[in-house]
Amino acid sequence: MELRQLECFVAVAEELHFGRAAARLRMTQPPLSRQVQMLEQDLGVTLLERHSRVVKLTAAGHRLLQDARHLLDYAARAALAARRAANGEAGHLTLGYTAVAAYRLMPALLMRAQAVLPEVDIQLREMVSADLARLLQAGELDVVLTRHVPMHQGLQKRLIDREALILALPAGSPLTAMESVPLRALHQQPLILYSPSDSRYFHDRIVGAMGLANISPRYVQRASQTHTLVALVRAGLGYGIVPDSARELHFEGVEYRPISQKNFYADIYLAWRQQSDNPAVEAFLDRVAGRKDQTEDAEALFE
């Protein structure tokens, strides 16, 4: 059976008139009749009883009509699905992200993706920035949300979020009396720092700012993840400098204050391979992340 034959048969079966069926299909009546006759010959059954101008379905015709409708509908949906996949409107995409991105940014992107690309299956993978960059280059991730993108000619990125670095402090600390805490107030104070290996971005940002301001805190503990750092603050081990999105953790016994220091913030980038062969990546970048006219070459940003 050919789809064109089934299409012609269904039109005649529903109209019970060759002339109306031909007009519906925008063709003349003789080729329409030939298509139905070839279908009957292929199946070896009579589908239509033709008496003068009266057309009736046989028992075989009634049965085939049900299945023919399903087959034509399935074929139409298959063609549509193929076109949607080619346009990036269907398929799958692997999104890598850092733990901090999961507090605000990643959920917001997922909600938008669900609204504008509901047929794209997004698989999530959480890991540190160094692993994100490595797996992106290797092609195991399609898009990543990361603090740092290494110099690599095959990668592109754009700044997607910039959030202030704020002070996390135990409830009852004297510094909670301040609406905004100057960085100098942390001189010789116990400070919980990010790990220089697992959280190098935050470690270098904080240590660098302290050095420029000639401030020397007492680094009492190191943590790889923001939620661990805030938990140590709650335990009263010291203060912590964290991105503003850490407020979403809602740790009881921990308060947050802005830090009155210029250019003290954390960036997060959306990065992808320039030569990706996944159409869903293009759709995600344009329709979810709003990439248009905002891309930057990753290598140029680090010159």
Image (cartoon, grey):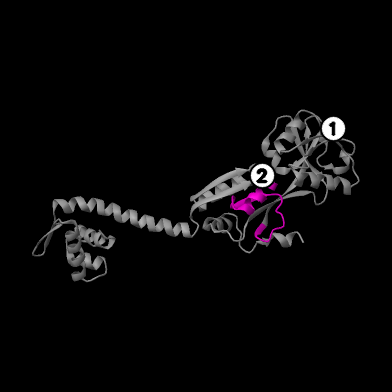
Tell whether position 145 is magenta. Answer: yes
135 is higher (above) or lower (below) than 292: above
In the image, the segment drawn in magenta is 130-157
Q: Amino acid at mark 2?
A: Thr
Quadrant assignment, res 202: top right
Numbered disc 2: secondary structure: loop
**Residue located beneath label 1 in the image:** 174
Quadrant assignment, res 98: top right
Tell whether position 131 is magenta. Answer: yes
**Residue 296 location (% of width, % of height):** 68, 61
**Which residue lies at the image location 80% right of the left edge and 46% below the top edge?**
204
**Residue 107 location (% of width, % of height):** 59, 44
Quarter placement of the C terminus = bottom right
Numbered disc 1: secondary structure: helix
Q: Amino acid at mark 1?
A: Pro
First along the sequence among labels 2 and 1:
2
The crowding category of the residue bearing disc 2, from other C-alpha atoms within 10 Å (few below 14, some 14 to 19, many at least 20), is: many
**Residue located beneath label 2 in the image:** 98
